[in-house]
Amino acid sequence: MTQRLGVDELAAILLDEHRYDNALPPKAFHKIAYFAQKELDEIGLSANISYFWYRYGIMTCTSGSSVGIDRGSVQNELSCNTDPDDLQLSENEEMQLRLAVNRALKQFYNLSLEGLTDKMYEEAPHDFQRHYRTLDKQLSTVVPTGPDYLAKTPTKEDIRETLFEFCNSFREDPINECLDDMLVFYRCMSDELDSENWSPNDLQEISRIFWGIVSAELAQKENSGLSLEQIAAEFEKSPEEFLSTQRGMRRELRTFEREDRMDLRQGSISPVTKSAADAVVTSIVDISWE
């Protein structure tokens, strides 16, 4: 493995090869780095770049590197304190790195950040991640202030169908530590969809909280051989702080569940509808709610 070729070298060349006036957003770096590394693998040049799967795809590890974020008044920008002229690479290594970066950049320019994320999710280790990607786009589209990721605004039934597909996929290939969370997630989402005054914003918030719980486990299971300490460092947290954040999200999810029970008592959700939703959950996970 070429230990000299790491995240500093990749970021320095990436910023040098980016030819447009608009700055690269930090979110794009993680995606471009992922595809650049794939290009390096095809060329036959190995790189020491660590990563893990998180909320919206791969996160490239930058802790302890010269890669950072310049926080501006309008938008954040990717920065790197390593100058391309200072890289300790052979002429051939630098040429191959520039080739790989340019190929990844071309995909970014052609597909945009969302398109590149979609392509990344085609290679996600679990099917349920792809179903969640669809659900997340649907929820973002129905939220009044959200971006229109889809050409057609999804209906409640569209969302319900994707929700069912996600939960069924999760059951078939589960993260066992999150199975109980999935039950609560389905119940909360289903109850909100069944409510007379359903809120797209609440659906998105429930989804965001649940996916954060799952992502904390994904990061620990789907990575390039990282420890929990290394993963937590990417969020400027200790391992305990990282796990504490996950526990906090679990409490938030249970808060939504308690509020749904209050709505049931107050009549916002009919008992018949509630029973039907619970029956669906039982069929999905082959386990009762009790």
Image (cartoon, helix red, strand yellow):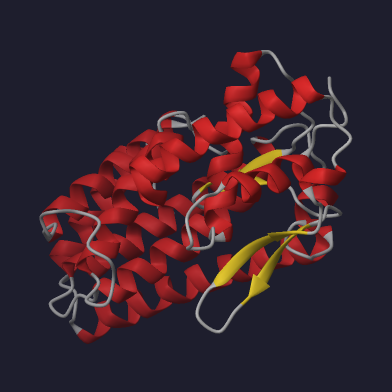
Q: Position of residue 186 (x, y in %)?
A: 35, 55
Place of residue 25 in the rendered image (x, y in percent of width and height, measured from the top left)? 53, 61
Give the number of marks. Answer: 0
- With respect to residue 46, does 271 lie above or below? below
Does residue 225 sit above or below 260 in this rendering? above
Left or right of residue 269: residue 117: right
Residue that appears at 63% across and 51% down:
15
The residue lying at 63 percent from left, 71 percent from top is: 248
Residue at 46% x, 28% y: name it: 123
Up-down: is 266 above or below 235?
A: below
Q: Quadrant of the N terminus?
A: top right
Name which residue lies at 40% across and 67% down: 206
Residue 107 image offset from top left, x and y in percent: 42, 36
Q: Is residue 44 left or right of residue 2?
A: left
Image spot of residue 204 (x, y percent): 35, 67
Residue 58 visible in the picture: no
Q: Nearer the viewer, residue 247 or 158?
A: 158
Q: Nearer the viewer, residue 264 or 7?
A: 7
Q: Nearer the viewer, residue 267 or 126?
A: 126
Question: Which quarter of the figure is the C terminus placed in?
Answer: bottom left
Residue 70 is at least partly visible in this image = yes
Q: Is residue 272 left or right of residue 239?
A: left
